[in-house]
């Protein structure tokens, strides 16, 4: 690319994140930091019951409390005439879409379901008033287990969804897969639970809504990963305000992991409340509310089987999953255990027959939706666990059985049996690099010696693939998305040659302000410090689809690259005119235009920019100013892959699992900023280790959330982690201008399987063949008995 | 996370604090606030007033005299863990205090608050039991002393009366030939003790055991002593085998289970962690 020599700050350099000084010193402004004149506060009363009828709600005492401006229930929202809906944005054939209103009307369906709203002058009063609302509930049975919920006679979440089934979905070819099993020499079979996770973004969700009843405009500051999606759904489904009258702004956002993609009732409630009281209204979730309202992740009950022939080749894969949807269908929920799950069942393997069947199941729990990895960790987990189980039943080494079954490097693009066409890959390359770094053969010797002394070590592999940067939009739409998946960018060169970049992505910790500037620095040959990146305001940039699904570099980065290319093209035309040369003869290098062969007579990009703005001497037909907009719709998904290896030690006395080493070799295509990519890998691995060893949302048989605080729900801590070892191979993405793939989720997709495979390996002397996540010390101790 | 309304008092003497406490039956003493404030934010506790004893100088000293170590109720974990005097006279307490929570918790939480709160999973009760600590208490009728073994009554319940304040913890300074250890198996979420074992052993001139105690946090409703098991070590050579056989008889009455760990598993953990604490204490004796 142009401008490779942009100091040390261009594409490929590990410069420090420019956003960090503000974030680290507490100067950055998050939604809850914002204060507007006349601002009041809103709180939401939530159901303590998993399932209950609402006989009546008495709000009179709360209304009488000093400082309370209003107390509202579903009836008031209905009476106000707004649509009041919280819609699902991904439709599958036959999907049941029961009504989801902004507050429960006559039935609550999970602990946390909103029942009433208080608006008060200060937060304390707003919380005090909640205790003065009296709801006469009619408690009913609830159910939390997605498989049991489908049994006849199980308590129903919605009357119009018999057996609680929201959808019944399949992919692959059942007949050919059954035939493969009929011919199999070996079958590996596992029953697993993919544990339910509670996102724990450091910043709780919050909204500050400012409705102006004279202009009819709503400004909504909120914790969002995708302001335009929120604006669209606020307009169409919840508030009924015209889209152009809503401006959604994402101030600094403190993490999301998916939980801030979704359109919830709460932010819409803050906006509606502002419309009622005519003052700015702030709502900020307490940590307790975060646990019972932020969409949870995972929660699958799965049976999986692999058919293997006499040579150790995989000939068929069959997977049957019950995936919890929770009480209502969250924004992208139906896509997660289907198109982001079933389509990944081929893993890195040349698998001739696959069949995956999924029930999406309503349960009396917090809705389930995308959470870092979204479907792909679940797919990778069952596939990679089955591969290890296949190794066990065939007696083939887990490394060898993987080699035998990988899609070969010369077999790309590779069409899987489950819709996806992998663009590029070299799976053995990453595996070999990882094995060498970990010292695989030496480890096996050490492991055998340790066992003699009653010390149990285990090594687990996860040779994973993932699909991210969903695209193109037409394909995503054909699968049911009620959204596009292209991305937008504006690259604006100012008269002085300084640059502002607007992206439709909306980062919340990923480092876009740094990496996107690096892309532009290299593309325009402009100093990195002369480039600013702006995101997260529907009032100042073209429509975009936001940041999730590891899409920002591949889609948003590509949009920026193509907008930058348009800028260079226009500047070249102007430069040719200024240099009195033919456009074809103009070269562009390090930010300078010159006639081929005479670089000393040049026009720099800032020179051209100034001329473009003055417009005193422009070529015919060329408009003034220097900026370009791009709407980039990628040709395909991108497919990062790699090998992760965990080494664990299991304490035979307590069952405690200690991670001794964790090594990741990832291939995420070209790397814009290696340090930031390492950071994403580290975070993802830590999150996956959290799922595999520590985290789980526990509901009791009546669907009450037992792990509702950080005293019980174990978010992993730094001292639980070994120092991660990371490395890369680079197989550029062939279909986007930057050759980049995605990295945001890779770590959390790959690591659970690596860790559990390692624990099962360590416990193999005890005859253990599977252990469910999280692998707590007691589970291990029981397994050793 | 917004507590209900409460009044706030900041007495400057123990007497004054006791007076306010007896005048306000719904009031609560505030020390480090690291147990009380969280439950107030969850509105699980709604005291009408807080009596902040954090500025009372008389509650903040560490001293050693006549073979006895005295620690004021408002001394923080950080001060205990890093005090040369405590490390020398009651290294077990310093070690246990150093394992509480994180740095922020250790800078705020106090020994008095920890013992008075009597959370079964907190780290100091077992150490106080194993060291045979004496707790000094002040109330409207003056002062009294309670032994640690009589102090912990039930789940989050002590023998403190509602109008009494714990003022000081007294511990006999460790004698020569004594070693101790606090070993904690952390709950991965809370960081509290799933099982915490406090062991003290003393070796005589010939190296054989002349005294031993072993107490646990986290296993049942209160910190418990397994001194019966420890006593069986007296006279032994404290070899790994002797320790192993002593703990094999360990059975903690009323061990409690929860959604994270069953009672049975906690019993087994107590054996493993207890043995480790005894071995380490022996090596330090
Ligand atoms: C994040 C976190 C992690 C933690 N981890 C641990 C851990 O690993 N191990 C552990 O042991 N603890 C842990 N704790 C709890 C911590 O140790 C508390 O500090 C302790 O339980 C209470 O001490 P305090 O001084 O903070 O008391 P406060 O919270 O102020 O008071 C606690 C209770 O004791 C009463 N009280 C306080 N002082 C006196 C007194 N002198 N006389 C009479 N009554 C009194 C109060 O009225 C109140 O009822 C943790 C706390 C937090 C927030």
Image: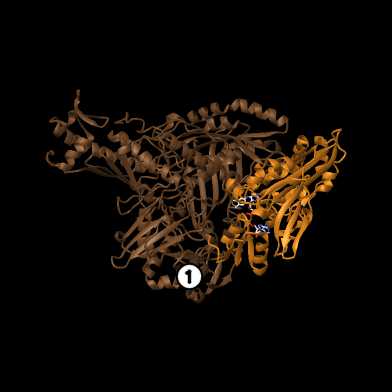
Residue A134 position (above or below residue A376): below
Image coordinates of residue A240 in percent, x first then y, are 35, 65
Image coordinates of residue A233 in percent, x first then y, are 37, 59
Q: Is residue B248 left or right of residue B257?
A: right
The tint of chain A in the picture is brown
The quarter holding residue A398 reads top right
Q: Is residue A500 left or right of residue B102?
A: left
Q: Residue furthest top?
A: A597
Q: Which chain is orange?
A: B
Q: Nearer the viewer, residue B113 or A214?
A: B113
Mark 1 surroundings within 10 Å by alpha-carbon count, few (fewer than 14), some (14 through 19), many (20 or more): some
Residue B189 position (above or below residue A572): below
Q: Is residue B215 left or right of residue A257?
A: right
The quarter holding residue B27 reads bottom right
Residue marked by disc 1: A105
In the rendered image, the quadrant that contains the C terminus of chain A is top right
Residue A140 position (above or below residue B117): below
The quarter holding residue A669 reads top left
Whether residue A505 is visible to the viewer of this picture, yes or no, is yes
Image coordinates of residue A247 in percent, x first then y, are 33, 57
Whether residue A317 is visible to the viewer of this picture, yes or no, is no
Image coordinates of residue B166 in percent, x first then y, are 70, 57
Q: Nearer the viewer, residue A104 or A247?
A: A247
Q: Nearer the viewer, residue B27 or A391?
A: B27
């Amino acid at each position: 690319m142009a401008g490779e020599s942009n100091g040390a700050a261009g594409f490929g350099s590990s410069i420090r994140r420019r956003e960090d000084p503000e974030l680290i010193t507490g100067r950055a402004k998050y939604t809850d930091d914002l204060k507007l004149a006349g601002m009041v506060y809103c709180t939401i009363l939530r159901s303590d019951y998993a399932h209950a009828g609402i006989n009546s709600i008495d709000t009179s005492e709360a209304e009488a409390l000093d400082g309370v401006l209003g107390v509202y229930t579903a009836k008031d929202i209905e009476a106000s005439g707004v649509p009041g809906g919280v819609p699902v944005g991904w439709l599958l054939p036959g999907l049941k879409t029961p009504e989801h209103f902004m507050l429960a009307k006559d039935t609550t369906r999970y602990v946390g379901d909103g029942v009433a709203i208080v608006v008060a002058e200060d937060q304390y009063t707003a919380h005090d008033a909640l205790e003065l609302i009296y709801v006469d509930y009619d408690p009913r049975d609830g159910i939390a287990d997605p498989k049991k919920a489908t049994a006849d006679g199980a308590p129903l979440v919605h009357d119009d969804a018999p057996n609680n089934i929201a959808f019944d979905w399949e992919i692959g070819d059942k007949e050919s897969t059954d035939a493969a099993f009929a011919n199999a020499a070996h079958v590996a079979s596992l029953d697993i639970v993919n544990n339910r996770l509670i996102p724990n973004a450091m910043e709780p969700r919050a909204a500050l809504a400012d409705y102006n009843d004279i202009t009819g405009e709503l400004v909504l500051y909120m914790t969002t990963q995708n302001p335009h999606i929120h604006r669209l759904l606020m307009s169409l489904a919840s508030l009924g305000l015209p889209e152009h009258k809503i401006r959604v702004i994402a101030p600094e956002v403190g993490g999301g992991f998916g939980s801030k993609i979704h359109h919830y009732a709460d932010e819409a409630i803050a906006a509606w409340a502002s419309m009622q009281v005519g003052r700015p209204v702030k709502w900020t979730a307490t940590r307790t509310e975060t646990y019972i309202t932020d969409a949870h992740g995972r929660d699958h009950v799965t049976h999986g089987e692999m058919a293997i022939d006499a040579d150790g080749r995989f000939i068929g894969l069959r997977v049957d999953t019950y995936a919890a949807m929770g009480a209502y269908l969250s924004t992208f929920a139906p896509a997660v255990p289907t198109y982001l799950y079933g389509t990944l069942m081929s893993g890195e393997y040349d698998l001739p027959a696959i069949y995956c069947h999924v029930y999406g199941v309503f349960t009396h729990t917090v809705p389930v939706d995308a959470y870092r990895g979204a479907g792909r960790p679940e797919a990778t987990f069952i596939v990679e666990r089955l591969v290890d189980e296949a190794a066990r039943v065939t007696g083939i080494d887990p490394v060898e059985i993987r080699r035998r079954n990988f899609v070969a490097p010369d077999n790309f693009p590779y069409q899987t049996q489950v819709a996806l066409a992998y663009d590029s890959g070299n799976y053995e390359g990453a595996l070999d690099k990882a094995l060498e770094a970990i010292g695989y053969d030496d480890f096996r010797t050490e492991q055998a010696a340790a066992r003699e002394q009653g010390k149990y070590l285990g090594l687990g592999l996860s040779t994973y693939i993932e699909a991210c940067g969903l695209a193109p939009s037409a394909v995503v739409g054909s699968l049911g998305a009620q959204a596009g998946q292209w991305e937008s960018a504006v690259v604006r060169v100012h008269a002085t040659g300084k640059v502002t970049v607007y992206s439709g992505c909306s980062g919340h910790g990923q480092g876009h302000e740094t990496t996107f500037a690096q892309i532009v620095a290299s593309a325009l040959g402009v100093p990195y410090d002369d480039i600013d990146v702006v995101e997260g305001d529907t009032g100042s940039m073209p429509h975009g689809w936001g940041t999730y699904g590891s899409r920002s570099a591949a889609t948003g980065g590509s949009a920026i690259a193509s907008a930058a290319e348009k800028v260079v093209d226009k500047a070249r035309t102007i430069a040719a005119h200024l240099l009195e040369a033919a456009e074809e003869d103009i070269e562009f290098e390090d930010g300078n235009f010159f006639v081929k062969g005479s670089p000393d007579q040049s026009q720099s990009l800032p020179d051209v920019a100034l001329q473009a703005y003055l417009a005193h001497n422009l070529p015919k037909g060329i408009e003034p100013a220097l900026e370009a907009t791009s709407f980039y719709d990628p040709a395909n998904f991108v497919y990062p892959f790699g090998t992760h290896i965990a080494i664990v030690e299991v304490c035979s006395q307590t069952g405690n699992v200690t991670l001794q080493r964790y090594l990741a070799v990832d291939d995420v295509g070209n790397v814009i900023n290696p340090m930031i990519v390492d950071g994403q890998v580290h975070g993802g691995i830590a999150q996956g280790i959290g799922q595999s060893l520590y985290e789980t949302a526990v509901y009791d048989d009546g669907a009450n959330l037992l792990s509702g605080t950080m005293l019980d729900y174990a978010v992993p801590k730094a001292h639980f982690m070994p120092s991660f070892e990371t490395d890369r191979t680079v197989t550029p993405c062939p279909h986007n201008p930057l050759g980049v793939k995605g990295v945001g989720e890779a770590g959390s997709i790959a690591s659970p399987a690596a860790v559990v495979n390692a624990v099962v390996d360590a416990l193999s002397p005890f005859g253990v063949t599977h252990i469910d996540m999280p692998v707590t010390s007691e589970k291990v101790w029981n397994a050793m008995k | 996370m917004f507590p209900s309304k409460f009044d706030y008092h900041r007495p400057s003497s123990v007497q004054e604090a006791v007076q306010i406490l007896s005048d306000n039956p719904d009031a609560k003493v505030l020390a480090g606030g690291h147990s009380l404030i969280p439950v107030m934010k969850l509105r699980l506790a709604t005291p009408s007033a807080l009596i902040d004893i954090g500025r009372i100088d008389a509650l903040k000293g560490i001293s050693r005299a006549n073979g006895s170590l005295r620690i004021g109720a408002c001394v923080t974990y950080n001060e205990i863990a890093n005090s040369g005097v405590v490390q020398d006279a009651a290294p077990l307490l310093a070690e246990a205090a150093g394992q509480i929570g994180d740095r922020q918790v250790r800078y705020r939480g106090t020994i008095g608050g920890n013992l008075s709160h009597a959370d079964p999973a907190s780290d100091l009760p077992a150490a106080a039991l194993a060291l045979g600590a004496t707790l000094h208490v002040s109330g409207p009728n003056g002062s009294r002393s309670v032994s640690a073994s009589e102090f912990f009554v039930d789940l989050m319940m002590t023998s403190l009366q509602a109008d009494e304040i714990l003022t000081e913890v007294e511990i006999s300074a460790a004698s020569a030939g004594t070693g101790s250890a606090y070993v904690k198996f952390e709950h991965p979420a809370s960081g509290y003790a799933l099982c915490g074992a406090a062991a003290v052993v003393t070796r005589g001139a010939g190296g054989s055991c002349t005294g031993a105690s072993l107490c646990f946090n986290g296993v049942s409703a209160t910190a418990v002593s397994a001194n019966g098991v420890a006593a069986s070590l007296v006279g032994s050579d404290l070899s790994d085998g002797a320790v192993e056989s002593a703990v094999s008889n360990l059975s903690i009455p009323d061990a409690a289970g929860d959604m994270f760990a069953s009672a049975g598993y906690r019993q087994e953990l107590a054996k493993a962690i207890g043995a480790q604490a005894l071995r380490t204490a022996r090596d330090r004796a």
